[in-house]
């Protein structure tokens, strides 16, 4: 028992030391914790690999051409609908949501691009995720498995996101993990069932 407590204390000390290092990214800390507790026999080797493998990177390709007359620089987040497509321009953001849109089927296809001034290799992606609005329009819930990662190299990437329910309302969240730098770019979200967008009071 004393030996086990000693190893647990060592693992906690390593975690604390790493958390106090300002230049250590969260992912490095996570990896060190996993390796430490694995070595001590508290978890089985490879038990976290399935979670990591669920990260989805958008595939290179596609194009985002904004509609004529759309002023893409008029705000932090600018949107416009044409047919079954929602166009989104974002300018220097870390986290923003689109308005709610109606899903035309159980999937949407999101093409996106962005750039960032950050040169840190840990901050060269931004994320897109889908949230569903409840029937009474009071709460939202994350669509499981809808998070997609897009590279911030200024070129377009495309991914089809499934798990939606036709006729229900959804919003897309755009996020970037850096607390210092921001992303600027655009999205093309295809698969809308209506040209009407909905803004819920109190949401961005």
Image (cartoon, rainbow, N blue to C red):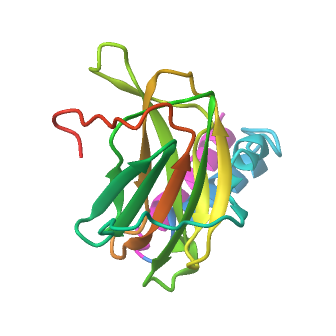
Q: Which residue is pictured at 37% across the width and 72% down the height? A: 182
Residue 73 visible? yes
Q: Is residue 185 left or right of residue 122?
A: left
Q: Is residue 56 left or right of residue 166?
A: right
Image location (x, y in percent) of residue 203: 22, 40
Q: Quadrant of residue 197?
A: top left
Is 55 drawn above or below residue 145 in the view shown?
A: below
Q: Residue furthest right?
A: 45
Q: Residue furthest left?
A: 202
Tell me the quadrant of the picture where the N terminus can be found.
top right
Q: Quadrant of residue 2?
A: top right
Image location (x, y in percent) of residue 3: 68, 43
Q: Residue furthest top?
A: 136
Is 87 drawn above or below residue 50 in the view shown?
A: below
Residue 13 visible? no
Inspect the magenta stretch and tell me whether residue 20 lies in it.
yes
Q: Nearer the viewer, residue 96 or 160?
A: 160
Query: What span is colored magenta in the figure?
Result: 1-22
* Count of number-bearing discs: 0
Q: Nearer the viewer, residue 105 or 135?
A: 105
Inspect the magenta stretch and tell me whether residue 177 lies in it.
no
Q: Is residue 187 left or right of residue 155?
A: left
Q: Which residue is pictured at 48% across the width and 44% down the height? A: 83
Is 30 drawn above or below residue 172 in the view shown?
A: below
Q: Quadrant of residue 149?
A: bottom right
Q: Nearer the viewer, residue 38 or 96?
A: 96
Is 191 drawn above or below residue 29 in the view shown?
A: above
Q: Main secondary structure of the magenta part?
A: helix
Image location (x, y in percent) of residue 195: 40, 38
Q: Which residue is pictured at 71% across the width and 44% down the height? A: 54
């Amino acid at each position: 028992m004393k030996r086990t407590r000693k190893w647990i204390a060592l693992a906690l000390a390593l975690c604390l030391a790493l958390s106090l290092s300002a230049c250590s990214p969260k992912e490095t800390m996570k990896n060190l914790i996993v390796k430490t507790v694995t070595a001590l026999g508290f978890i089985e080797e490879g038990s976290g690999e399935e979670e990591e493998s669920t990260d989805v990177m958008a595939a290179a390709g596609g194009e985002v051409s904004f509609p004529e007359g759309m002023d893409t620089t008029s705000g932090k987040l600018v949107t416009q609908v044409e047919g079954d497509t929602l166009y989104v321009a974002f300018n220097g953001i870390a986290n923003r949501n689109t308005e709610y849109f109606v899903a035309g089927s159980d999937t949407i296809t999101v093409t996106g691009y962005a750039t960032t001034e950050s040169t840190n290799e840990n901050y060269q992606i931004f994320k897109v995720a889908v949230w569903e609005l409840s029937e009474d329009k009071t709460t939202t819930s994350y669509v499981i498995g809808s998070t997609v990662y897009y590279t911030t190299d200024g070129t377009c990437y495309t991914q089809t996101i499934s798990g939606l329910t036709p006729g229900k309302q959804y919003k897309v969240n755009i996020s970037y993990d850096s607390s210092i730098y921001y992303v600027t770019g655009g999205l093309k979200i295809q698969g809308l069932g209506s040209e009407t967008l909905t803004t819920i009071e109190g949401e961005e």
